[in-house]
Image (cartoon, grey):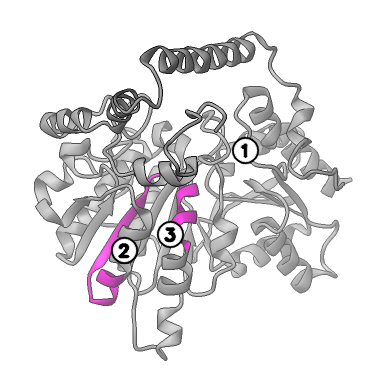
Amino acid sequence: MTRLPKSVGNEPAVYFLSNMLRPNRVRRIPHLIGDMGEYIPKDVYAAAVAADPYPKFRTKLVAENHATAAELDAIDAEIKAEIDEAEAFAMNSPPPDAREVKRDVYAYEIA
Amino acid sequence: MSNVNMIQSLNWALHDAMEADDNVILFGEEIADPEGGGIVKISAGLSTKFGSRVRSTPISEMGFMGAAVGAAVAGMKPVVEIMLMNFVAVCMDQITNHAAKLRFMSGGQTSVPMVIRTMTGSGFQNGGQHSDFLEAWFCHTPGIKVVMPSNAADAYGLLRSAIDDPDPVLFVDYLNNYWTPSAPPTRGEKIPLGKARIHGAGTDVTVIGYSRSMLDIPPVAEKLAKEGISVEVIDLRTVSPLDMDTILTSVKKTGRCVVVHEAVKSFGVGAEVSSRIHESLFKELKAPVQRVASNDSPVPYAPPLEAAFLYSHADIEAAIRKTLA
């Protein structure tokens, strides 16, 4: 939540978001990775893209002076850099040792 | 006729059951032809032939499992595909509290003749929430039967019987069997539920498997046969109810037994089989019954860990040798 705009009117950020971001949309990716989603009717997909709440919310934040486009771009860049760094770390790390299959099932070793 | 894989034999079983009985209907994600005929195409061609009796559902297992239970109570014979076995967790109430109990709770006045078909197995890097063998959850639930075929012919005959059965049946496929050809079924030939199959007769030790482990036990048995160790291999086919007649007859003869399954070891089917053998044949046993199963953890994603999670052929061999020591 630290990346949220600091001021969202007089309402606490969480309350504000619960009224603004309703998880009520068609997901734009297919059912699973590797599935090209050919079965999604083109008009349904086009309507889903048009109704995508993310760009709408971004436009609203800028229009209502909660953040500037540059500030939102900076947030996007920061998140992308964090993901890129995590991906690079994962891809460049050696495979885990087989003994790790016994680790982290519980907080404490039990046997 | 040449060998076929389980995708083909299950497709035939669904087709033949739908042709034989108009009450047989299919629910599941992406199972109708416009959506691809199923994730691995087990229902390919069926919606084209049988129309709205094949329903592609939303990604809402709780919803369509509940609809199937209702349809079964009303006299239909739904066959529901749960794409991967882990997803049964989101519709457990419909399966265990409703489908499995309605006959008992209504004093025998309600039948729920439905089949829940699903697929699973490690080795595909599908991760911890897409790979588990969860049959023990359902074996521990009175009122539902659990069928787990190991080859294409058994899959056909058992699915036909499961669809005919007046009670709910969970039917679990091992993913790799979809692409592993074996002898074809005889169309129309049903295999009774609750009957194990002697895969190979032997005299020294009984090794019991089902589903995936039936791909792993025979190679070990063949290796040991070259040393003069005679292994009797039993494929349970139906895990609940257990075919105790076949199991006890075999273990009474050999005096030794190993149970092998991919599901995690603790509190699993192997424990139940082992316990029942000890209860019945304690004095005849020449060694304690051994269990070979997977590590007690979620199925890992990383290949070295996924390999370490599963038992190995060496583990099966070691367990057999332990009973002979």
- Pointer 3 chain: B
Q: To which quarter of the image does residue B252 belong? A: bottom right
Along the line of sight, which residue is nearer the eye, B84 or B318?
B84
Q: Residue at x 35, y 27 (%)?
A: A61
Dot 3 crowding, Cα within 10 Å, few <14, some 14–19, many 20+:
some
User: Which of the 4 image quarters holds residue A41?
Assistant: top left
Type of amino acid under label 3: Cys
- Mark 2: amino acid: Ile
Picture disc at residue B244: none
Q: Position of residue A65 (x, y in %)?
A: 36, 25
Q: Earlier in the sequence, mark 2 or mark 1?
A: 2
Who's the residue at 51% across and 18% down the image?
A79
CB under 8 Å between discs 2 and 3: no
Magenta range:
B70-92
Is A111 placed above or below B127 here? below
Residue B123, horizontal then vertical, whole percent: 56, 30
x, y percentage for residue B320? 77, 44
**What element does badge 3 sit on?**
helix
Say what amino acid the circle numbered 1 marks: Val
Q: Which residue is mark 1?
A: B299
Q: Chain of mark 1?
A: B
Mark 2 or 3, closer to the camera: 3
Residue B204 appears in the rendering: no
**Mark before the other along the chain sequence, 3 or 1:** 3
Q: Which residue is mark 2?
A: B163
